[in-house]
Amino acid sequence: MLIQLSSRARRGIAIAGLALLPLASTADNIVGSPPPFDIDPPAVTWTDPAKLQAALDEKIALLSSVVIHEKILRYSQARNSVRQLDTLDTDVEVIDGVERYTDVRRNRVALAHTGEIRGAWSFGEVVTLLRGARDALNQHVLDTRSTVAENGNPVVRMAFYYPADSHRWFVSVDSRIYWLDFAGKIWISPRTGDILRISWESTAAPPPAAGVASVLWTVDFHSADVAGRICTLPDTGIYRVNHSVGDAWSEWNVTKFLGIGRYGSEVKLLFDP
């Protein structure tokens, strides 16, 4: 299965991913970043990838017909100057296992479609990221480690890797696609088996023509009751693009997932405008 997560950045750059800034190894005081997990826990064997795959299959199936609202705060940094660029709002519908974006607004002004968005943004947090993690468990897990989150609860971290030739993640510059090598991590609750966090990080820069040094995508998840079904849904994300054109600069998005509903249900999306 080919997963193409894409977002548009300046100079015609389209970049896959999103990121809820994660670990101490990559976090650098980004606005909105969550407390880091322990990044070097002792190796253990805890979970069976096949069982986790089956659990993810069930979680993905439950997301059919879900609709959720995204509020995306976008920032940039050049040298020591950080500024907020704008705010995006959109409703995300899961149709046949694929995200569809509707009612897209930039600073409350309606856009005809996502192609009108300029600057870095991301999509794929609701179901595509879970599917990518599920597929990785089949043959790409490198190790499994036990650790403790900032709140003191135990977690298990599974690491995996995809080479560029697996065609999982890409950057596209002026319609030219550059596939990325990337490392991924999945954090799981050993008590409940719930997915707590998924992170992807590019491990090698694409060719200089892309103008991109690295991409980082992390999403924190939580369980929620949607029309009587317990679903695994994104809670917060940060997507970061580090550029390498001229003076180094970065863009990142802090995304909150707010209203939740399901087609065929009397559910209204409620969120702060």
Image: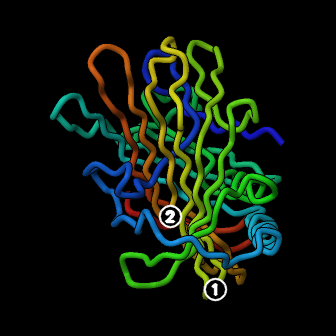
The N terminus appears in which quarter of the rendering?
top right
Q: Is residue 214 left or right of residue 159?
A: left
Where is residue 206? Give x, y as percent: 55, 22
First reached walking from the N terminus: tag 2 or tag 1? 1
Q: Relative to 176, say whether 213 is above or below.
A: below
Residue at far front of view: 43
Which residue occupies 50% across, 72% down?
A: 42
Q: Quadrant of residue 85?
A: top left
Callout 2: SS: strand
Q: Amino acid under label 2? A: Asp
Q: Amino acid under label 1? A: Thr
Q: Which residue is mark 1?
A: 192
Where is residue 57? Give x, y as percent: 81, 66
**Which is more toward the observer, 254 or 26?**
26
Residue 264 visible at all: no
The C terminus appears in which quarter of the rendering?
bottom left
Where is residue 82? Give x, y as percent: 20, 38
Number of marks in picture: 2
Which residue occupies 75% across, 59% down?
A: 137
Tell me whether circle 2 and circle 1 mark residues in contact (CB < 8 Å).
no
Where is residue 217? Give x, y as percent: 51, 47
- Please rate how many residues cluster around mark 2, counting C-alpha atoms within 10 Å: few if below 14, some from 14 to 19, many from 20: many
**Which is more toward the observer, 98 or 182?**
182
- Please rate how many residues cluster around mark 1, counting C-alpha atoms within 10 Å: few if below 14, some from 14 to 19, many from 20: few
Q: Quadrant of residue 263?
A: bottom right
Q: Is residue 251 left or right of residue 145?
A: left
Q: Which mark is residue 220?
A: 2
Callout 1: SS: loop
**Which is more toward the observer, 168 or 42?**
42
Q: Quadrant of residue 86?
A: top left
Which residue occupies 51% across, 26% down?
A: 205
